[in-house]
Image: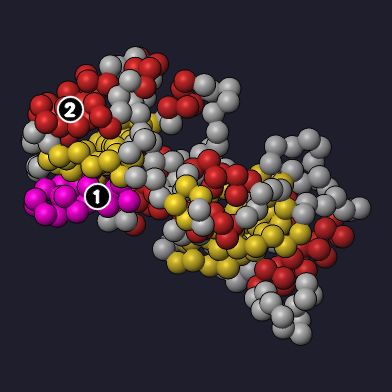
Amino acid sequence: MQVLRSIEALSTLPGPLALAVGVFDGLHLGHQEVIRAAQEHATQHHGTAVVVTFDPHPAQVLRPGSAPKLLCGPRHQQLILSQLGIPCLLACPFTPETAKTPARDFIGRLVASAKPLGCISVGYTWSFGHRREGNIHLLMELGQQHDFAVYGVPPLKIDSEVVSSTLIREAVSKGDFAKAARFLGREHSVFGTVVEGQRLGRQLGFPTANVAVESEQLPPLGVYAVQARIGGEWRPAVANLGRRPTVAENADPTLEVHFPDWSGDLYGQELEVRFTRLLRPEMKFSGLEELKAQIQRDIKAALTPPAAPGSPHDTHA
């Protein structure tokens, strides 16, 4: 997938251009409907579909003290878009000056750079530009003026709830992966780079990949059965998301992933990790031997499929 960093770079793409414009944090099912409208227009008119988003997330610039965690950071977003078959992403740099751009000027730059602009697809309630003055009605007016189509995609509802990044973020923060997956259209995952750790896991006989996650929403602290992608292949693993209270005091939460049936050097590589189920909450142990014994039990639990509801081995029945 090609990644552009300026609106003017749109001029390098074969038109007509079909632009899906939005923040697209999470790329959930509602976002995918907006993107699909642009993809269909590009197919019908033999043009190029482009997802137009902003980097960093506008909230991180406009209200950094209260900006929410992301559902997918920039690199994670690129990975998901490539899986959706998007040929091009325009990641517009977002600064305080960008926030002051009048809505008409923003659209004017898109019109001037696209050769030509075929359509703009947005969520029906999306607003943009200085003081959020731009909306679907202004877009339709500008579409008539500059001869491009406008698609205002209505909100998507599942189980009587409007699919939104906020609801998915809340579900993940509570460990409700089933609800998050329903709204995302895929299992929730996080993405980051494997960095150097304290190598304590290796000393205990359980080497871990320490994942420096992009600023993404994490579930509650605890030990999880997970799947992690190495070289395009998903592998079962066990992950500790926590502060390591047995060996550290007041440490920041870290994500450590252990692969029971794999060995190799992952330093510097990007890792995508999806949470399957919570095995236990984070605990403090009396010492390393007790911790080591519990890790062995965690690995066994992570590799054992959960019992079907109602089966003789279902302890919750």
Q: How crowded is mark 2: few (under 14 residues within 10 Å), some or many (20 or more)?
A: few
Q: Position of residue 282 (x, y in %)?
A: 78, 51
Q: Residue at x 30, y 17 (%)?
A: 101
Magenta residues, start to end: 33-51
What amino acid type should be assigned to the residue bearing mark 2? Answer: Glu
Residue 112 on the magenta segment: no
What amino acid type should be assigned to the residue bearing mark 1? Answer: Ala
Instruction: Using the rendered view, name the quadrant where residue 245 is placed.
Output: top right
Q: Which residue is drawn at 20% across and 38% down?
A: 150
Instruction: Using the rendered view, name the quadrant where residue 50 is placed.
Output: top left
Of 189 and 228, the residue lying toward us: 189
Q: How crowded is mark 1: few (under 14 residues within 10 Å), some or many (20 or more)?
A: many
Q: How is the image coloured?
A: secondary structure
Of 148 and 299, the residue lying toward us: 148
Residue 141: which disc? 2
- Look at the numbered disc 2 and give the secondary structure of its residue: helix
Q: Which residue lies furthest to the bottom in this view?
A: 312
Residue 37: which disc? 1
Can residue 250 be seen here? yes
Image height of 264 relative to 250, above or below: below
Relative horizontal placement of residue 109, taking residue 198 as reference (left or right): left
Q: Position of residue 40 (x, y in %)?
A: 19, 54
Q: Position of residue 131 (x, y in %)?
A: 38, 17
Q: Which residue is drawn at 50% across and 53% down?
A: 160
Image height of 255 relative to 54, above or below: below
Of 263 and 296, the residue lying toward us: 296
Q: Residue at x 49, y 43 (%)?
A: 165
The answer to which of marks 2 and 1 sits earlier in the sequence is 1
